[in-house]
Amino acid sequence: MKEIKVKKKKKLYEGKAKIVYETENEELLIQEFKDDATAFDGKKKGKIKEKGAFNNQISGRLFTFLESYHVPTHFVSQFSANAMVIKRLEMIPVEVVMRNVATGSLVKRYGVKDGTELDHPIIEFYLKDDAKHDPMINEDHVIAFGHADADEIKLIKRYAQKINAVLQSFFFRRDMVLVDFKLEFGRGKSGKIKLGDEISPDTCRLWDVQSGEKLDKDRFRQDLGKVEEAYREVHRRVFS
């Protein structure tokens, strides 16, 4: 892993789960993961002990793994237990959701039986806008609103499908089902599309292969208890 020495400078942005800082290098930022947990557009709030460190380390491991499959990401190196050095991207304000098993909003919208394994993975797009509750949009909306052009959408879909295939296999080998997950993409300095944000139990639904036990943020959303234990278990398996 590359070791990049940078210094944390001015706070650039703070969201619900992360803080992004500038560094002395214009092209590099520090992404710090928080222990704060939110759900339902921020209506439910709490803290999950060590969540920031777990999500940072899991994300770094998965970004590195994806890079080995020629998926370009913003990850550069770890900075601390709960922070990483990343490349500065112009983020596209669209969440790309991949679904392999029916659950959550898919079940509510379409009446599919919860837990149904989908015959074909589904790709969905959502506009990143908390005030509007992240409405679902389609490819034409993304292009018409100027968020990305047709070639970029085509590439993003190809990356999302590849990431899904790679990570499904990665997690299954560690006795976890990748039920669904969220991705975010941005443009690098040259305009090249790269994967950004994070890949963690905050952004993935992961179920134990044998028991079906939930090992992700749904434990917090649904008051299932043992939230910290679930994050710790995913971390253990990811690094096994």
Image (spheres, rainbow, N blue to C red):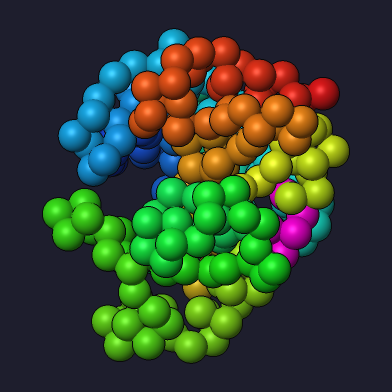
Above/below status of 155 relative to 125 = below
Above/below status of 102 relative to 170 = below
User: Residue 54 sits in which quadrant?
Assistant: top right
Q: Position of residue 232 (x, y in %)?
A: 61, 16
- Work out whether residue 4 can be spotted: no
- Quarter of the image with the C terminus is top right
Q: Position of residue 127 (x, y in %)?
A: 31, 65
- Quarter of the image with the N terminus is top right
Q: Which residues are magenta?
A: 161-167
User: Residue 149 sits in which quadrant?
Assistant: bottom left
State the residue lying farthest toward the left. Answer: 131
Depth check: give the residue in front, 198 or 75.
Answer: 198
Magenta part mainly helix, strand or loop?
helix
Q: Position of residue 59 (x, y in %)?
A: 60, 36
- Work out whether residue 233 can be spotted: yes
Point 44% across, 41% down: residue = 29
Point 27% across, 59% down: residue = 134
Point 46% across, 26% down: residue = 219
Depth check: give the residue in front, 196 or 46.
Answer: 46
- 212 horizontally vs 168: left or right: left
Q: Position of residue 185 (x, y in %)?
A: 49, 61
Point 75% across, 40% down: residue = 171
Depth check: give the residue in front, 11 or 102.
Answer: 102
| Number of numbered discs | 0
